[in-house]
Structure formats: structure tokens, C-alpha cells
Amino acid sequence: MRRLLTIGHSYTVGVNRRLAHEMALAGKNRWEVTCAAPRFVIGDLRPIELEAIDEEACHLEPVSLRMTSRPHFMTYARDAKRLVTSGAWDLIHAWEEPYIPAGWQISRWAKKIAPFVFYTYQNISKRYPPPFNWLENETLRNSTAWIAGGHTVEDAMMSRSGYADHPHARISLGVDTNLFQPYTERGNRILSSLNWSASGPPIIGFLGRFVLDKGVNLLMKALDGLQTGWRALFVGGGVLERKLRHWGSQYGDRVRIVTGITHTQVPDYLNAMDILAAPSQTTPRWKEQLGRMLIEGFASGLPVVGSNSGEIPSVLGDCGLVVEESSDSAWKKTLGELIENASYRNELGEKGRDRAITHFSWPVIAKRNIDFFDQLLDSPIPKH
């Protein structure tokens, strides 16, 4: 029986720990999986204490994490070090970037214990200032292999010194296709709570952070130009909330803005939408790395419209609509066509649901991870 330790700050959230849970199921009778999850993190939108999940297949080990409000400076405490250096592992996997202290810490603890593999979602080749460039270089030296979170991540990292010398795999994040699925009754309950009728105009939904990078300004401008009837539901939170509420006030009952919801509530809100819009905007320092809302929208049976920023075109494939990120007129046209064509919305929703199940469901993603780990251990591990 091989023993895997997987550790990451995202595992505090129960739905994120589905990766560890499903790896335990995918490796049943061959792998014993232990998941190290922080007891508490500040989170992007709310403080989060370690969440439970039903019938968890992996062994859960709570650990302490410091400075969780600043991800680039987070560090694990002594209990995490004791766990990593216990010497009981055949492979250690970190869901942490290699250039941050948390990722570097784990690589350093793991280097004399077991092969070490890290995940990265950086899809822009950046020159980090000290000490982050030192941390990244040492993490690479301590690592056996790495996992790219998408096509654009793989392309960017393969151009960087050290990455091409290590084995790697391209494996995205996943989605719980049982939690996220079409469920009209739940959507109707959300509509009722919003004082909206199920028979009203189609609802264009936005899910995520209310920030410039996520395209909130562009979406507001595109909605301003629509001539056909619409409603808009914004779910999330962020620095543009006040501006968003001021903009929405001119439309009265047509706009709803919801903040402070937990991730387990997200499926219900997605079921209240008719279209999911993801107008992410590329900046010199950022472009969309995955767009989890895309695969959650797919799983929920929604037609998904995304910009051509970063990984979005690869995620959507031919099952969603890709729109030029800087063109509010193109967004207006695409959204208008979807609003007016219910059969087309249904067709895209069905294709998206199928793509979520076959490409992004957690069992599929977990098996890819376990297969990669088996491949590494069954092959001669190169020295670095």
C-alpha cells in the first residue's frame, strides 16, 4: 500500500477537499491518502474554519497555517512540519505555488522524506523579485515533478528555467457534478427569496469577485446596451460592490446583488440563472487561470459565455461561447442572442453538463493525479 500526503491551504474548504477524497477512492487498495488541511483561513470573501464533508475517504489531519490573509506570505506551523517529516510517505503532494513560503516550506521538509510534487496555476512567465525567485528555485531543486493547472500554465512554465527538466502533467481542478447539477426547484427557491418570478425575463448571472480583473465593469456596460428584456444576478463580493450597487439602482427590480454566501450555497444560485457570464480581463500581471465558475456553470447545465482571457477558451472548448474580452459590443451581441433563443441556451447547457462530467468531474481529475503519481513511482526518479 502506497501512502500519499497531500497538503494545501485550499483544503480548509470542504468542496476543495474532494480532490483528496476522490484520490483515496481512485487509489483504493493501492493508495492510502492523508490530507493535511488548515484549521482556519481568512479566505477571499469570508473567514473559513475547517469544513467537514460526509463520508470522507481520506484521512484528515488538521494543521496550523499563519498569515492566511496574505497568501504570498503564508507559512505552515510546527504541526505541519512534524506531519510532513514523519517519514511515513511514498509521495508528498502540495496544492501550493512553488514561489510562496508555504510551498517552499513543504518542499524543504519533503526533500529527504519522499518524492515531492507541486501544483502551479501561474500562466504568465514572471520574474519574481527576491525572495520569491529564491523560493521558487529551491522548490524546483527539492521537487520530483510538477502539475500544470491548464494549457496556458503548461506553456508558460515550460519556458521557465528548471521546469522543463522535471516530469510534469497537465491536470485542472475539478467540480462536484452531484452538488452542481440542474435543479429547478432549488433555483426557484432562490428566485422566491429574491422576490423574482420564475416567469420573468432571462437572468444573466455573474459569480465571483467584484473586481476589475473579473470584468464587472465590462458586463455592466454590455447590459446597459441590451435592448431586449433581461435581469442580472451578481453573486460574490469585492471592492467594486459599492459601484455595482450604484449601477444596479438605476434598474430597480431587474438587478440583484448577493454577497456573503458559502460555497455550498453556490449551486442553488447558479440554478437561479439562465446564462452565466465570465468576462475576465487580461492585465499585464494576470489572466484567467481556470475560471472555476465556468466548470460549475457547466455542471449546473447553464449556457456559459466567457472572454478569451487566459485558460477560458481551453476550458469552454466547443461547449461554451468565447467572446473578445475587450469588446462590450461583442458581449452585448452574444448575450442578446442567448436571451432571445431559449432552445440555443438549452443546447449549450446540455453540452456543458456533458463536458463537466467527462472532463472536469472530481473522479476524473483524481484518477489523473493518481495515475501520474503511479507513473512517477514506477519509473526511475531523476535526480535534480
Image (cartoon, grey):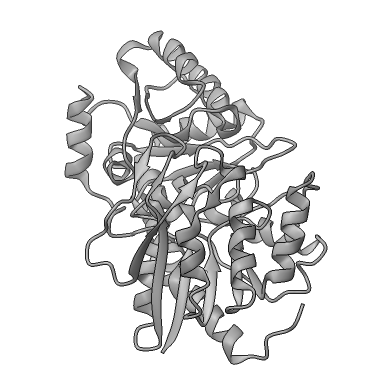
Q: Nearer the viewer, residue 295 or 52?
A: 52
Task: Give the image location of residue 214, x and y in percent.
Answer: 56, 34
Q: Residue drawn 42% across and 68% down?
A: 358
Q: Nearer the viewer, residue 249 or 124?
A: 124
| In this view, 221 is above or below 309 | above
Left or right: 274, with 207 as reference point: left
Q: Is residue 190 visible?
A: yes
Q: Residue drawn 52% across and 47% down?
A: 291
Q: Residue drawn 53% across and 27% down?
A: 216
Left or right: 341, with 223 as reference point: left
Task: Give the image location of residue 148, x and y in percent.
Answer: 63, 63
Task: Give the image location of residue 343, x and y in percent.
Answer: 35, 45
Q: Is residue 125 visible?
A: no
Task: Give the image location of residue 197, x and y in percent.
Answer: 20, 26
Q: Quadrant of the C terminus?
A: bottom right
Q: Residue drawn 73% across and 49% down?
A: 132
Q: Quadrant of the N terminus?
A: bottom left
| In this view, 146 is above or below 76 | below
Q: Residue furthest top?
A: 250
| In this view, 199 is above or below 270 | above
Left or right: 250, with 306 as reference point: left
Left or right: 149, with 30 as reference point: right
| In this view, 14 is above or below 308 | below
Task: Please state the total of marks drawn on the protein image.
Answer: 0
